[in-house]
């Protein structure tokens, strides 16, 4: 069955009239008995039946008399006197139903003719192949399980309005198979990440989502209040400080696939709540963290794409070759070879160039932070294939270990792919006195008006004083990884329920 016969009862009606008509049908169902039965147990999924029997010809399948119980949402319906066809969709796919008077009885068949697209139905019967070779259930018993009161989007136009897709994701998932596929892949990506981490002998843990002190990142938090304790609490901006407490406690390899929250702007890359995976390993440096990051991304890509050479927005992305590594200055000069070393170390020139590229001047002082701001304006968007930017300045890396060989720099990296940041990691700072001094510097910035500067976390300092072994850590943005591997252009396409302004 390839065409839907117009549903004559609803063809000329507007949405409000359709809903009113369907409510009348529901009232009639209530009068007859249980309107929403819950005693049907299916034993088969559409995709499994297609995989097992779809390739058999009619003559081979019919004698097997394969009995099935299926259920799903009715998407297509064609009534033809004494026989009707319908297509139902379950979580795995679609399968066709054949209903006639001989199979279900005249009364049941007549009732079926008045069901609507979107209704959830159950059917029992046997499999056969139509003359067109389509796997079909010859129905012996059919039931209406859930009456749909609202009409589905037009079969041919689908649900195309972006805002409606985000606000009414449930309709988007019914109407758009490509949306369902994105979120199935998202689940597979998360599972691939988890499997890879467990294979590297990491322990998955859970840490608090409400913090007495926000920490682990430079960001503006959401604030709430705990009534019983009468204290303010902050929604987690990152799990970092709790995970490193666990490393202090002897859990030497930990990871968390976590929800975090940042009270900041929204964009194609930013949602106020987001998912990332953070992991920490004792007795390693940021070099090991970069290798782990490559491994995680390749494992996810191989799982959902079947290849390490993928396409994003029409361009190839090479995930197979070793990821390039550049310093901030090297990246600036690679894409702006006309810049000189003298200019890139001239504070006044840097500020002018930063403004020219439309970037805000950094609040933190120092040549390093100015170079970083210029990088963000003139080079970041050019990093198409995976590139680690390494050795960040101390003033913008309050939790990273300072380099022993390069004063003013830290052992930190950020990974960029298709022009956007995907991961951030470093050799962890494990000197409690150095960490305390950096916290105090952050507090000074907060007192000066920087809402994103960190608080002083006395308990974390206390934990460090028990001894944090040399440790590497990293955070990978799961939403952005899903965007990359599903060719999604905005984060809202990979978040089931993105934050929206109320209707």
Image (cartoon, helix red, strand yellow):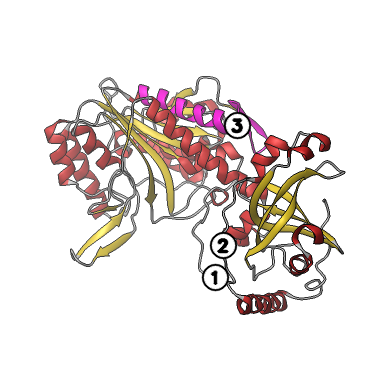
Disc 2 residue crowd, few under 14, some 14–19, many 20+, Cα 10 Å: some
Against 287, is 186 above or below? below
The residue at 59%/51% (across/down) is 42
Give the residue at mark 3. 305
Q: Nearer the viewer, residue 211 or 159?
A: 159
Residue 125, percent from left and from top: 71, 51
The mark found on residue 167 in the picture is 2
The mark found on residue 503 in the picture is 1
The residue at 62%/30% (across/down) is 310
Magenta-drawn stretch, dominant element (helix, strand or loop): helix
Disc 3 residue crowd, few under 14, some 14–19, many 20+, Cα 10 Å: some
Answer whether residue 301 is magenta in the image.
yes
Against 206, is 82 above or below? below
Quadrant position of residue 385: top right
Residue range in magenta is 288-317
Q: Does residue 470 appear left or right of residue 9 in this picture?
A: left
The residue at 42%/53% (across/down) is 273
Against 350, is 409 above or below? above
């Amino acid at each position: 069955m390839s065409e839907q016969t117009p549903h004559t009862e609803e063809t000329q009606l507007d949405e409000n009239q359709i809903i009113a008509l369907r409510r009348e049908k529901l009232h009639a169902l209530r009068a007859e008995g249980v309107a929403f039965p819950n005693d049907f147990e299916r034993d088969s999924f559409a995709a499994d039946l297609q995989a097992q029997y779809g390739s058999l010809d009619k003559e081979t399948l019919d004698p097997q008399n394969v009995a099935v119980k299926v259920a799903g949402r009715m998407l297509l319906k064609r009534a033809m006197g004494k026989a009707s066809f319908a297509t139902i969709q379950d979580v795995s796919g679609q399968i066709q139903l054949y209903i006639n008077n001989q199979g279900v009885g005249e009364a049941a068949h007549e009732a079926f003719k008045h069901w609507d697209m979107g209704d959830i139905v159950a059917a029992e019967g046997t499999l056969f192949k139509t003359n067109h070779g389509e796997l079909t259930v010859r129905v012996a018993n059919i039931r209406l399980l859930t009456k749909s009161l609202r009409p589905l989007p037009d079969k041919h136009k689908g649900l195309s309005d972006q805002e409606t897709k985000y606000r009414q994701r449930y309709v988007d998932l019914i109407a758009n198979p490509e949306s369902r596929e994105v979120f199935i892949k998202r689940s597979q990506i998360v599972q691939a990440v988890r499997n890879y981490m467990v294979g590297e002998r990491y322990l998955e843990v859970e840490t608090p989502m409400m913090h007495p002190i926000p920490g682990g990142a430079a960001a503006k938090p959401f604030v709430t209040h705990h009534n019983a304790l009468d204290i303010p609490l902050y929604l987690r901006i990152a799990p970092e400080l709790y995970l490193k407490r666990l490393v202090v406690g002897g859990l030497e390899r930990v990871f968390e696939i976590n929800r975090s929250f940042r009270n900041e702007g929204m964009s194609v890359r930013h949602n106020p709540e987001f998912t990332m995976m953070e992991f920490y390993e004792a007795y390693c440096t940021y070099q090991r963290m970069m290798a782990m990051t490559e491994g995680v991304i390749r494992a996810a890509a191989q799982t959902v794409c079947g290849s390490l050479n993928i396409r994003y927005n029409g361009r190839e992305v090479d995930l197979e070759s070793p990821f390039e590594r550049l310093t901030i200055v090297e990246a600036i000069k690679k894409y702006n070879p006309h810049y000189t070393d003298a200019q890139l170390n001239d504070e006044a020139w840097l500020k002018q160039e930063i403004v020219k590229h439309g970037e805000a001047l950094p609040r933190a002082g120092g040549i390093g932070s100015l170079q970083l701001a210029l990088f963000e304006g003139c080079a970041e968007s050019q990093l198409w294939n995976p590139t680690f930017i390494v050795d960040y300045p101390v003033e913008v890396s309050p939790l990273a270990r300072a380099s022993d060989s390069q004063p003013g720099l830290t052992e930190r990296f950020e990974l960029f792919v298709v022009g956007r940041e995907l991961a951030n990691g470093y050799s962890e700072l494990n000197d409690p006195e150095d960490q305390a001094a950096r916290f105090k510097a952050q507090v000074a910035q907060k007192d000066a008006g920087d809402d994103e500067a960190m608080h002083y976390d006395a308990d974390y300092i206390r934990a460090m004083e028990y001894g944090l072994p040399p440790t590497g850590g990293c955070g990978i943005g799961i939403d952005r990884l899903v965007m990359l591997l599903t060719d999604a252009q905005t984060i809202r396409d990979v978040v089931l329920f993105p934050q929206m302004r109320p209707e």
